[in-house]
Image: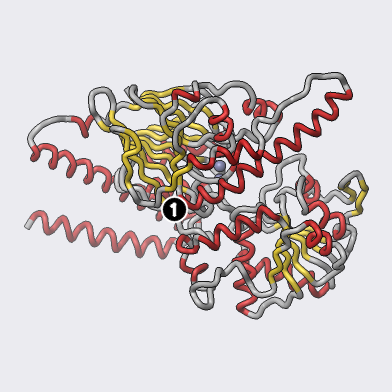
Amino acid sequence: MINLQFCGAAGTVTGSCYLIDNGKHRLLVDCGLFQGSKAIKERNYGPFPFEPSSINAVILTHAHIDHCGLIPKLYLQGYKGPVYTHPVTVDLASVLLPDSGHIQEMEVERKNRKNSRAGLPLLTPIYTAEQAAACLPYFEGIDYGVEKEILPGIRLRLQNAGHILGSAIVELWLKDDDNNEVKITFSGDLGNPGHPVVQDPAKIVHTDYLVIESTYGNRCHKLEKDTIEQLKEVIQTTMKKGGNLVIPAFAVERTQDLLYALHVLIKQGAIAVDKIYLDSPLAAAATDIFCKHQEYFDEQTKSLSADGVTCPFYLPGLHISRTTEESMAINQISGGVIIISASGMCDAGRIKHHLKHNLWRKEATVLLVGYQAVGTLGHRLLQGEKQVRIHGEEIAVKADIVNITGFSAHADQTGLLNWIKSFDHLPRKVFVTHGEEKSSEDFANLIISELGLEAEVPEWLSSVQLLPVPEKIVAGPTEKLIAQAAAAEAEARYQRLVIQLKAMVEAGFARQEYDRINRKLEQIEALISESLLEEVS
Ligand SMILES: [Zn+2]
Ligand SMILES: [Zn+2]
Protein backbone atom coordinates (compact mmCIF):
# COMPACT_ATOMS: atom_id res chain seq x y z
CA MET A 1 0.00 0.00 0.00
CA ILE A 2 1.36 3.42 -0.91
CA ASN A 3 0.25 6.24 1.31
CA LEU A 4 0.47 9.98 0.60
CA GLN A 5 -0.02 12.50 3.40
CA PHE A 6 -0.43 16.24 2.86
CA CYS A 7 1.67 17.78 5.64
CA GLY A 8 1.71 21.33 4.22
CA ALA A 9 0.59 23.64 1.39
CA ALA A 10 -2.88 22.08 1.67
CA GLY A 11 -5.63 24.70 1.66
CA THR A 12 -2.89 27.32 1.84
CA VAL A 13 0.10 28.40 -0.25
CA THR A 14 3.03 27.93 2.12
CA GLY A 15 4.65 25.12 4.12
CA SER A 16 4.91 22.71 1.17
CA CYS A 17 5.48 19.16 2.53
CA TYR A 18 4.30 15.70 1.41
CA LEU A 19 4.99 12.38 3.11
CA ILE A 20 5.01 9.22 0.97
CA ASP A 21 5.17 5.76 2.54
CA ASN A 22 5.27 2.54 0.49
CA GLY A 23 5.40 0.27 3.52
CA LYS A 24 9.17 -0.12 3.29
CA HIS A 25 10.44 3.45 2.97
CA ARG A 26 9.28 6.93 3.84
CA LEU A 27 10.04 9.98 1.70
CA LEU A 28 9.37 13.68 2.02
CA VAL A 29 8.82 15.93 -0.97
CA ASP A 30 9.64 19.47 0.27
CA CYS A 31 9.81 20.59 3.89
CA GLY A 32 8.85 24.25 3.74
CA LEU A 33 8.32 27.05 6.20
CA PHE A 34 4.75 28.21 6.84
CA GLN A 35 4.38 31.93 6.15
CA GLY A 36 1.47 34.37 6.43
CA SER A 37 -0.99 34.74 9.30
CA LYS A 38 0.00 34.13 12.92
CA ALA A 39 -2.12 30.95 13.08
CA ILE A 40 -0.39 29.49 9.99
CA LYS A 41 3.09 30.46 11.25
CA GLU A 42 2.35 28.67 14.53
CA ARG A 43 2.74 25.38 12.57
CA ASN A 44 6.50 26.01 12.29
CA TYR A 45 6.90 25.33 16.02
CA GLY A 46 6.39 22.08 17.91
CA PRO A 47 6.95 18.58 16.54
CA PHE A 48 6.51 17.49 12.91
CA PRO A 49 3.40 15.35 12.18
CA PHE A 50 5.85 12.44 11.57
CA GLU A 51 8.99 11.13 13.25
CA PRO A 52 11.95 12.81 11.45
CA SER A 53 14.32 9.89 12.12
CA SER A 54 11.87 7.53 10.33
CA ILE A 55 12.32 9.40 7.01
CA ASN A 56 14.70 7.76 4.48
CA ALA A 57 15.07 10.55 1.91
CA VAL A 58 13.98 14.10 1.20
CA ILE A 59 13.31 15.47 -2.30
CA LEU A 60 13.26 19.23 -2.75
CA THR A 61 11.47 20.96 -5.67
CA HIS A 62 13.13 24.40 -5.40
CA ALA A 63 14.90 26.87 -3.16
CA HIS A 64 12.00 29.08 -2.04
CA ILE A 65 11.77 29.11 1.76
CA ASP A 66 8.15 27.94 1.78
CA HIS A 67 9.48 24.72 0.18
CA CYS A 68 12.83 24.17 1.98
CA GLY A 69 12.69 26.39 5.09
CA LEU A 70 12.07 23.61 7.65
CA ILE A 71 14.80 21.25 6.39
CA PRO A 72 17.27 22.46 9.06
CA LYS A 73 14.64 21.75 11.74
CA LEU A 74 14.25 18.24 10.29
CA TYR A 75 17.98 17.58 10.88
CA LEU A 76 17.83 19.12 14.36
CA GLN A 77 15.04 16.68 15.23
CA GLY A 78 16.85 13.56 14.10
CA TYR A 79 16.79 13.21 10.28
CA LYS A 80 20.16 12.13 8.90
CA GLY A 81 19.50 11.22 5.25
CA PRO A 82 20.09 12.97 1.91
CA VAL A 83 18.23 15.87 0.29
CA TYR A 84 17.93 15.22 -3.46
CA THR A 85 17.43 18.33 -5.57
CA HIS A 86 18.68 20.16 -8.65
CA PRO A 87 22.33 21.41 -8.51
CA VAL A 88 21.21 25.07 -8.82
CA THR A 89 18.91 24.55 -5.82
CA VAL A 90 21.83 23.10 -3.83
CA ASP A 91 23.70 26.38 -4.41
CA LEU A 92 20.71 28.66 -3.79
CA ALA A 93 19.79 26.80 -0.58
CA SER A 94 23.35 27.31 0.64
CA VAL A 95 22.69 31.06 0.88
CA LEU A 96 18.91 31.11 1.48
CA LEU A 97 18.79 28.65 4.41
CA PRO A 98 21.50 30.35 6.53
CA ASP A 99 19.80 33.69 5.72
CA SER A 100 16.49 32.23 6.96
CA GLY A 101 18.26 31.08 10.16
CA HIS A 102 19.69 34.57 10.60
CA ILE A 103 16.23 36.17 10.22
CA GLN A 104 14.85 33.81 12.88
CA GLU A 105 17.70 34.62 15.26
CA MET A 106 17.03 38.35 14.81
CA GLU A 107 13.28 37.91 15.37
CA VAL A 108 13.77 35.86 18.53
CA GLU A 109 16.34 38.34 19.86
CA ARG A 110 13.81 41.16 19.43
CA LYS A 111 11.01 39.16 21.10
CA ASN A 112 13.33 38.09 23.94
CA ARG A 113 14.23 41.70 24.75
CA LYS A 114 10.49 42.27 25.34
CA ASN A 115 10.02 38.96 27.13
CA SER A 116 12.87 39.53 29.56
CA ARG A 117 11.52 42.99 30.42
CA ALA A 118 8.09 41.40 31.02
CA GLY A 119 9.58 38.52 33.04
CA LEU A 120 8.35 35.96 30.46
CA PRO A 121 10.31 32.82 29.45
CA LEU A 122 12.85 33.29 26.67
CA LEU A 123 12.35 31.78 23.21
CA THR A 124 14.84 29.90 21.01
CA PRO A 125 14.87 30.25 17.21
CA ILE A 126 13.58 27.31 15.12
CA TYR A 127 17.17 27.10 13.89
CA THR A 128 20.16 29.40 13.67
CA ALA A 129 22.25 30.39 10.63
CA GLU A 130 24.94 27.98 11.84
CA GLN A 131 22.46 25.10 12.25
CA ALA A 132 21.14 25.79 8.73
CA ALA A 133 24.66 25.65 7.31
CA ALA A 134 25.29 22.33 9.09
CA CYS A 135 22.68 20.44 7.00
CA LEU A 136 23.98 21.63 3.61
CA PRO A 137 26.54 18.81 3.15
CA TYR A 138 23.58 16.36 2.96
CA PHE A 139 22.26 18.05 -0.21
CA GLU A 140 22.89 16.11 -3.43
CA GLY A 141 22.35 17.55 -6.90
CA ILE A 142 20.57 15.57 -9.65
CA ASP A 143 20.28 17.10 -13.11
CA TYR A 144 17.01 17.38 -15.07
CA GLY A 145 16.03 14.22 -16.95
CA VAL A 146 18.35 11.88 -15.04
CA GLU A 147 16.61 8.86 -13.52
CA LYS A 148 18.01 7.70 -10.18
CA GLU A 149 17.08 4.81 -7.92
CA ILE A 150 17.18 6.66 -4.60
CA LEU A 151 16.05 3.67 -2.52
CA PRO A 152 15.37 0.02 -3.43
CA GLY A 153 12.18 0.07 -5.57
CA ILE A 154 11.95 3.88 -5.69
CA ARG A 155 13.09 5.88 -8.73
CA LEU A 156 13.25 9.66 -9.01
CA ARG A 157 13.52 12.02 -11.98
CA LEU A 158 13.51 15.83 -11.89
CA GLN A 159 12.17 17.88 -14.81
CA ASN A 160 12.35 21.63 -15.38
CA ALA A 161 9.43 23.45 -13.70
CA GLY A 162 10.34 26.84 -15.24
CA HIS A 163 9.47 28.72 -12.01
CA ILE A 164 12.85 29.90 -10.70
CA LEU A 165 16.28 28.73 -11.80
CA GLY A 166 16.78 25.12 -10.66
CA SER A 167 13.07 24.57 -9.92
CA ALA A 168 11.89 21.03 -10.57
CA ILE A 169 8.85 18.91 -11.25
CA VAL A 170 9.29 15.65 -9.29
CA GLU A 171 8.51 12.31 -10.96
CA LEU A 172 8.51 9.31 -8.60
CA TRP A 173 8.02 5.62 -9.34
CA LEU A 174 7.30 3.48 -6.28
CA LYS A 175 6.67 -0.23 -5.82
CA ASP A 176 3.95 -1.31 -3.37
CA ASP A 177 3.88 -4.50 -1.25
CA ASP A 178 2.72 -6.57 -4.24
CA ASN A 179 5.54 -5.21 -6.41
CA ASN A 180 3.09 -3.13 -8.49
CA GLU A 181 4.54 0.17 -9.63
CA VAL A 182 2.73 3.47 -9.14
CA LYS A 183 3.90 6.75 -10.59
CA ILE A 184 3.22 10.05 -8.86
CA THR A 185 4.21 13.46 -10.16
CA PHE A 186 4.51 16.69 -8.14
CA SER A 187 4.31 19.85 -10.24
CA GLY A 188 6.25 21.85 -7.63
CA ASP A 189 5.71 25.55 -8.31
CA LEU A 190 5.01 25.74 -12.03
CA GLY A 191 6.37 28.63 -14.08
CA ASN A 192 4.72 30.93 -16.54
CA PRO A 193 5.55 29.81 -20.11
CA GLY A 194 7.56 32.47 -21.94
CA HIS A 195 8.97 33.90 -18.70
CA PRO A 196 12.51 35.23 -19.23
CA VAL A 197 15.68 33.66 -17.75
CA VAL A 198 14.10 30.23 -17.02
CA GLN A 199 13.10 27.67 -19.64
CA ASP A 200 9.44 26.71 -20.07
CA PRO A 201 7.97 23.97 -17.83
CA ALA A 202 8.72 20.47 -19.16
CA LYS A 203 5.96 18.30 -20.56
CA ILE A 204 5.14 15.10 -18.69
CA VAL A 205 4.43 12.00 -20.77
CA HIS A 206 2.46 9.97 -18.27
CA THR A 207 1.63 9.79 -14.59
CA ASP A 208 -0.87 7.79 -12.53
CA TYR A 209 -1.32 10.52 -9.92
CA LEU A 210 -0.61 14.22 -10.05
CA VAL A 211 -0.16 16.75 -7.23
CA ILE A 212 -0.42 20.24 -8.71
CA GLU A 213 0.00 23.74 -7.29
CA SER A 214 -2.82 26.28 -7.65
CA THR A 215 -1.41 29.66 -6.56
CA TYR A 216 -3.31 31.21 -9.49
CA GLY A 217 -5.88 28.39 -9.74
CA ASN A 218 -8.78 30.80 -10.23
CA ARG A 219 -7.05 33.78 -11.82
CA CYS A 220 -5.56 34.64 -15.17
CA HIS A 221 -2.68 37.07 -15.53
CA LYS A 222 -3.87 40.34 -16.99
CA LEU A 223 -2.95 40.68 -20.62
CA GLU A 224 -0.85 43.77 -20.38
CA LYS A 225 1.44 45.75 -22.53
CA ASP A 226 4.83 44.08 -22.76
CA THR A 227 6.52 44.18 -19.32
CA ILE A 228 9.82 45.46 -20.73
CA GLU A 229 7.98 48.22 -22.58
CA GLN A 230 6.30 49.29 -19.32
CA LEU A 231 9.65 49.27 -17.52
CA LYS A 232 11.14 51.46 -20.26
CA GLU A 233 8.39 54.07 -19.81
CA VAL A 234 8.83 54.14 -16.01
CA ILE A 235 12.60 54.62 -16.35
CA GLN A 236 12.27 57.33 -19.01
CA THR A 237 9.67 59.26 -16.99
CA THR A 238 11.71 59.09 -13.78
CA MET A 239 14.96 60.14 -15.45
CA LYS A 240 13.15 63.06 -17.11
CA LYS A 241 11.88 64.15 -13.66
CA GLY A 242 15.47 63.92 -12.41
CA GLY A 243 14.76 61.46 -9.59
CA ASN A 244 15.88 57.97 -8.61
CA LEU A 245 13.98 54.82 -9.51
CA VAL A 246 13.75 52.54 -6.45
CA ILE A 247 12.71 48.92 -7.11
CA PRO A 248 12.04 46.59 -4.15
CA ALA A 249 12.62 43.05 -5.44
CA PHE A 250 12.88 39.50 -4.14
CA ALA A 251 16.50 38.37 -4.19
CA VAL A 252 15.97 35.20 -6.21
CA GLU A 253 14.55 35.27 -9.75
CA ARG A 254 12.73 38.65 -9.59
CA THR A 255 16.02 40.55 -9.28
CA GLN A 256 17.53 38.57 -12.17
CA ASP A 257 14.34 39.06 -14.26
CA LEU A 258 14.81 42.81 -13.77
CA LEU A 259 18.50 42.66 -14.71
CA TYR A 260 17.49 40.76 -17.85
CA ALA A 261 14.88 43.41 -18.76
CA LEU A 262 17.35 46.24 -18.08
CA HIS A 263 19.95 44.54 -20.27
CA VAL A 264 17.45 44.32 -23.15
CA LEU A 265 16.66 48.05 -22.82
CA ILE A 266 20.33 49.04 -22.62
CA LYS A 267 21.06 46.96 -25.71
CA GLN A 268 18.20 48.69 -27.55
CA GLY A 269 19.65 52.07 -26.52
CA ALA A 270 16.21 52.84 -25.05
CA ILE A 271 17.37 54.08 -21.64
CA ALA A 272 20.14 56.34 -20.39
CA VAL A 273 20.90 55.84 -16.70
CA ASP A 274 23.96 57.00 -14.75
CA LYS A 275 24.19 53.86 -12.70
CA ILE A 276 22.21 50.78 -11.69
CA TYR A 277 22.75 49.71 -8.09
CA LEU A 278 22.06 46.19 -6.92
CA ASP A 279 21.98 46.70 -3.18
CA SER A 280 21.21 43.45 -1.39
CA PRO A 281 23.85 40.92 -0.28
CA LEU A 282 21.38 38.09 -0.82
CA ALA A 283 20.38 39.25 -4.31
CA ALA A 284 24.08 39.67 -5.17
CA ALA A 285 24.84 36.13 -4.00
CA ALA A 286 21.82 34.74 -5.88
CA THR A 287 22.88 36.59 -9.06
CA ASP A 288 26.38 35.08 -8.78
CA ILE A 289 24.79 31.61 -8.47
CA PHE A 290 22.58 32.23 -11.52
CA CYS A 291 25.66 33.31 -13.47
CA LYS A 292 27.50 30.14 -12.44
CA HIS A 293 24.69 28.10 -14.03
CA GLN A 294 24.10 29.92 -17.32
CA GLU A 295 23.53 26.62 -19.14
CA TYR A 296 20.02 26.57 -17.64
CA PHE A 297 19.04 30.01 -19.00
CA ASP A 298 16.48 30.16 -21.79
CA GLU A 299 17.68 31.03 -25.30
CA GLN A 300 16.63 34.71 -25.25
CA THR A 301 18.62 35.30 -22.04
CA LYS A 302 21.68 33.39 -23.31
CA SER A 303 21.66 35.45 -26.50
CA LEU A 304 22.16 38.66 -24.49
CA SER A 305 25.71 37.67 -23.61
CA ALA A 306 28.01 39.38 -26.09
CA ASP A 307 30.64 36.63 -26.08
CA GLY A 308 28.58 33.71 -24.82
CA VAL A 309 30.68 33.62 -21.65
CA THR A 310 30.05 36.87 -19.77
CA CYS A 311 26.89 36.56 -17.69
CA PRO A 312 24.12 38.78 -19.11
CA PHE A 313 23.21 39.92 -15.58
CA TYR A 314 26.56 41.70 -15.09
CA LEU A 315 25.26 44.46 -17.31
CA PRO A 316 27.09 47.65 -18.26
CA GLY A 317 26.75 50.31 -15.55
CA LEU A 318 25.78 47.80 -12.85
CA HIS A 319 27.24 48.41 -9.41
CA ILE A 320 26.82 45.61 -6.88
CA SER A 321 27.19 47.01 -3.38
CA ARG A 322 28.30 44.26 -1.05
CA THR A 323 29.35 46.23 2.06
CA THR A 324 27.25 48.42 4.39
CA GLU A 325 29.46 51.44 3.54
CA GLU A 326 28.77 51.00 -0.18
CA SER A 327 25.06 50.72 0.57
CA MET A 328 25.04 53.88 2.72
CA ALA A 329 26.88 55.85 0.03
CA ILE A 330 23.83 55.43 -2.26
CA ASN A 331 21.76 57.50 0.20
CA GLN A 332 23.68 60.59 -0.95
CA ILE A 333 22.46 60.28 -4.56
CA SER A 334 19.37 62.44 -5.21
CA GLY A 335 18.63 61.45 -8.81
CA GLY A 336 19.53 59.71 -12.07
CA VAL A 337 20.05 56.16 -10.83
CA ILE A 338 18.15 52.88 -10.48
CA ILE A 339 18.31 51.12 -7.10
CA ILE A 340 17.25 47.48 -6.88
CA SER A 341 17.10 46.23 -3.30
CA ALA A 342 15.41 43.69 -1.02
CA SER A 343 13.11 42.79 0.59
CA GLY A 344 10.50 42.62 -2.14
CA MET A 345 7.63 43.67 0.14
CA CYS A 346 9.62 46.56 1.69
CA ASP A 347 9.29 45.24 5.25
CA ALA A 348 12.94 44.39 5.95
CA GLY A 349 16.46 44.85 4.67
CA ARG A 350 18.26 47.69 2.93
CA ILE A 351 15.25 48.73 0.83
CA LYS A 352 13.83 50.55 3.87
CA HIS A 353 16.80 52.94 3.85
CA HIS A 354 16.32 53.69 0.15
CA LEU A 355 12.61 54.29 0.64
CA LYS A 356 13.34 56.63 3.55
CA HIS A 357 15.66 58.67 1.33
CA ASN A 358 13.46 58.72 -1.78
CA LEU A 359 9.76 58.46 -0.88
CA TRP A 360 9.55 62.14 0.14
CA ARG A 361 11.04 63.34 -3.19
CA LYS A 362 8.35 64.06 -5.78
CA GLU A 363 10.84 63.48 -8.60
CA ALA A 364 11.50 59.87 -7.48
CA THR A 365 9.57 56.73 -8.44
CA VAL A 366 9.04 53.52 -6.47
CA LEU A 367 8.32 50.60 -8.78
CA LEU A 368 6.60 47.54 -7.26
CA VAL A 369 7.13 44.38 -9.31
CA GLY A 370 6.05 41.62 -6.92
CA TYR A 371 3.26 40.40 -4.69
CA GLN A 372 2.65 42.71 -1.71
CA ALA A 373 1.02 40.92 1.24
CA VAL A 374 -1.57 42.80 3.31
CA GLY A 375 0.09 44.57 6.24
CA THR A 376 3.47 45.10 4.58
CA LEU A 377 4.94 48.52 3.79
CA GLY A 378 4.80 47.62 0.10
CA HIS A 379 1.05 47.01 0.35
CA ARG A 380 0.50 50.36 2.12
CA LEU A 381 2.37 52.15 -0.69
CA LEU A 382 0.33 50.28 -3.28
CA GLN A 383 -2.86 51.39 -1.49
CA GLY A 384 -1.75 55.00 -1.94
CA GLU A 385 -0.98 55.94 1.68
CA LYS A 386 0.49 59.43 1.84
CA GLN A 387 2.45 59.01 5.07
CA VAL A 388 4.37 55.92 6.24
CA ARG A 389 6.57 55.08 9.20
CA ILE A 390 10.09 53.77 8.50
CA HIS A 391 12.59 53.06 11.32
CA GLY A 392 10.38 55.05 13.69
CA GLU A 393 10.33 58.14 11.46
CA GLU A 394 7.28 59.59 9.68
CA ILE A 395 7.96 59.87 5.93
CA ALA A 396 5.75 61.75 3.45
CA VAL A 397 5.01 59.82 0.26
CA LYS A 398 5.47 62.22 -2.64
CA ALA A 399 7.24 59.92 -5.10
CA ASP A 400 5.23 58.21 -7.84
CA ILE A 401 4.24 54.66 -6.89
CA VAL A 402 4.03 52.41 -9.96
CA ASN A 403 3.08 48.74 -10.17
CA ILE A 404 4.05 46.30 -12.94
CA THR A 405 2.42 42.90 -12.53
CA GLY A 406 3.80 41.05 -15.54
CA PHE A 407 6.77 39.48 -13.76
CA SER A 408 4.86 36.60 -12.14
CA ALA A 409 6.86 33.37 -11.84
CA HIS A 410 3.70 31.25 -11.52
CA ALA A 411 1.56 29.84 -14.31
CA ASP A 412 -2.00 31.23 -14.19
CA GLN A 413 -5.18 29.15 -14.44
CA THR A 414 -4.85 28.71 -18.22
CA GLY A 415 -1.14 27.88 -17.90
CA LEU A 416 -1.81 25.21 -15.25
CA LEU A 417 -4.66 23.65 -17.24
CA ASN A 418 -2.71 23.68 -20.51
CA TRP A 419 0.21 21.98 -18.78
CA ILE A 420 -2.01 19.05 -17.70
CA LYS A 421 -3.56 18.93 -21.19
CA SER A 422 -0.08 18.58 -22.70
CA PHE A 423 0.50 15.18 -21.03
CA ASP A 424 0.42 12.29 -23.51
CA HIS A 425 -1.67 10.30 -20.99
CA LEU A 426 -3.86 12.14 -18.53
CA PRO A 427 -3.47 11.21 -14.84
CA ARG A 428 -5.96 8.98 -13.08
CA LYS A 429 -6.42 11.45 -10.25
CA VAL A 430 -5.27 14.98 -9.45
CA PHE A 431 -4.66 16.49 -6.00
CA VAL A 432 -4.82 20.28 -6.00
CA THR A 433 -2.59 21.96 -3.40
CA HIS A 434 -0.45 25.09 -2.81
CA GLY A 435 -3.25 27.66 -3.15
CA GLU A 436 -5.70 29.60 -1.04
CA GLU A 437 -8.75 27.37 -0.44
CA LYS A 438 -11.00 29.07 -3.01
CA SER A 439 -8.27 29.04 -5.64
CA SER A 440 -7.59 25.31 -5.17
CA GLU A 441 -11.30 24.41 -5.17
CA ASP A 442 -12.07 26.40 -8.31
CA PHE A 443 -9.15 24.79 -10.10
CA ALA A 444 -10.13 21.25 -8.99
CA ASN A 445 -13.66 21.89 -10.33
CA LEU A 446 -12.20 23.08 -13.62
CA ILE A 447 -10.11 19.90 -13.94
CA ILE A 448 -13.27 17.84 -13.37
CA SER A 449 -15.43 19.78 -15.85
CA GLU A 450 -12.82 20.46 -18.56
CA LEU A 451 -10.73 17.30 -18.48
CA GLY A 452 -13.20 14.81 -16.99
CA LEU A 453 -10.60 13.73 -14.42
CA GLU A 454 -11.00 12.92 -10.76
CA ALA A 455 -9.69 15.84 -8.71
CA GLU A 456 -9.76 16.83 -5.06
CA VAL A 457 -8.43 19.45 -2.67
CA PRO A 458 -6.84 17.55 0.23
CA GLU A 459 -7.12 18.90 3.76
CA TRP A 460 -4.04 19.66 5.83
CA LEU A 461 -2.69 16.40 7.38
CA SER A 462 -5.15 14.20 5.49
CA SER A 463 -3.90 11.01 3.76
CA VAL A 464 -4.80 9.07 0.63
CA GLN A 465 -3.89 5.62 -0.66
CA LEU A 466 -2.35 5.46 -4.10
CA LEU A 467 -3.53 2.25 -5.73
CA PRO A 468 -1.93 0.90 -8.89
CA VAL A 469 -3.87 1.79 -12.03
CA PRO A 470 -5.74 -1.43 -13.02
CA GLU A 471 -4.92 -1.38 -16.74
CA LYS A 472 -1.26 -1.52 -15.98
CA ILE A 473 -1.32 -4.57 -13.71
CA VAL A 474 -3.41 -6.97 -15.79
CA ALA A 475 -1.07 -9.86 -16.45
CA GLY A 476 -1.40 -11.64 -19.77
CA PRO A 477 0.18 -12.30 -23.12
CA THR A 478 2.24 -9.46 -24.57
CA GLU A 479 -0.29 -8.93 -27.39
CA LYS A 480 -3.00 -8.27 -24.85
CA LEU A 481 -0.85 -5.66 -23.10
CA ILE A 482 0.01 -3.99 -26.39
CA ALA A 483 -3.67 -3.93 -27.36
CA GLN A 484 -4.53 -2.39 -23.99
CA ALA A 485 -1.83 0.24 -24.38
CA ALA A 486 -3.08 1.08 -27.88
CA ALA A 487 -6.64 1.38 -26.59
CA ALA A 488 -5.53 3.65 -23.76
CA GLU A 489 -3.58 5.79 -26.19
CA ALA A 490 -6.54 6.08 -28.56
CA GLU A 491 -8.79 7.02 -25.66
CA ALA A 492 -6.33 9.67 -24.42
CA ARG A 493 -5.86 11.03 -27.93
CA TYR A 494 -9.63 11.25 -28.44
CA GLN A 495 -10.03 13.04 -25.08
CA ARG A 496 -7.29 15.50 -25.95
CA LEU A 497 -8.87 16.24 -29.31
CA VAL A 498 -12.28 16.91 -27.74
CA ILE A 499 -10.68 19.26 -25.21
CA GLN A 500 -8.64 21.11 -27.81
CA LEU A 501 -11.61 21.50 -30.14
CA LYS A 502 -13.81 22.79 -27.34
CA ALA A 503 -11.12 25.25 -26.17
CA MET A 504 -10.54 26.52 -29.72
CA VAL A 505 -14.23 27.07 -30.44
CA GLU A 506 -14.89 28.71 -27.07
CA ALA A 507 -11.92 31.06 -27.45
CA GLY A 508 -13.12 31.98 -30.95
CA PHE A 509 -16.69 32.60 -29.69
CA ALA A 510 -15.38 34.73 -26.84
CA ARG A 511 -13.51 36.89 -29.32
CA GLN A 512 -16.47 36.80 -31.73
CA GLU A 513 -14.22 35.48 -34.49
CA TYR A 514 -17.05 33.53 -36.13
CA ASP A 515 -15.54 33.62 -39.62
CA ARG A 516 -12.27 32.16 -38.43
CA ILE A 517 -14.05 29.45 -36.41
CA ASN A 518 -16.23 28.62 -39.44
CA ARG A 519 -13.15 28.26 -41.64
CA LYS A 520 -11.38 26.03 -39.11
CA LEU A 521 -14.44 23.84 -38.51
CA GLU A 522 -14.92 23.51 -42.25
CA GLN A 523 -11.33 22.26 -42.60
CA ILE A 524 -11.82 19.77 -39.76
CA GLU A 525 -15.13 18.58 -41.28
CA ALA A 526 -13.39 18.02 -44.60
CA LEU A 527 -10.64 16.00 -42.93
CA ILE A 528 -13.16 13.83 -41.07
CA SER A 529 -15.29 13.05 -44.13
CA GLU A 530 -12.10 12.29 -46.06
CA SER A 531 -10.99 9.74 -43.46
CA LEU A 532 -14.51 8.28 -43.31
CA LEU A 533 -14.39 7.77 -47.08
CA GLU A 534 -11.04 6.02 -46.70
CA GLU A 535 -12.57 3.63 -44.16
CA VAL A 536 -15.45 2.64 -46.45
CA SER A 537 -13.32 2.13 -49.51
ZN1 LIG B 1 8.29 29.00 -5.41
ZN1 LIG C 1 5.66 27.85 -3.52
**Is residue 218 in view?**
no
**Is residue 103 in view?**
yes
Picture residue at 70% right of the left edge, 64% below the top: 320
Name the residue that disc number 1 marks: 201
Residue 452: quadrant of the picture = top left
The amino acid sitting under disc 1 is Pro
Residue 229 in the figure: left or right of residue 106: left
Picture residue at 49% right of the left edge, 60% below the top: 293
Expressed as whole percent of the image width and height from the top left, the position of residue 368 reads 72, 55
Among all residues in the image, which is located at the extreme bottom? Answer: 269
Q: Quadrant of ligand 2?
A: top right
Residue 114: quadrant of the picture = top right
Residue 94 in the figure: left or right of residue 24: right
Residue 281 in the figure: left or right of residue 193: right
Picture residue at 74% right of the left edge, 40% below the top: 374
- Residue nearest the observer in this picture, 127 or 444: 127
- Residue nearest the observer in this picture, 361 or 412: 361
Expressed as whole percent of the image width and height from the top left, the position of residue 252 reads 61, 53
Q: Is residue 436 above or below residue 323?
A: above
Residue 209: quadrant of the picture = top left
Total marks placed: 1
Indicate how the structure is coloured in the image: secondary structure
Expressed as whole percent of the image width and height from the top left, the position of residue 38 reads 71, 29
Residue 476 in the figure: left or right of residue 283: left
Picture residue at 58% right of the left edge, 30% below the top: 73
Tag 1 secondary structure: loop
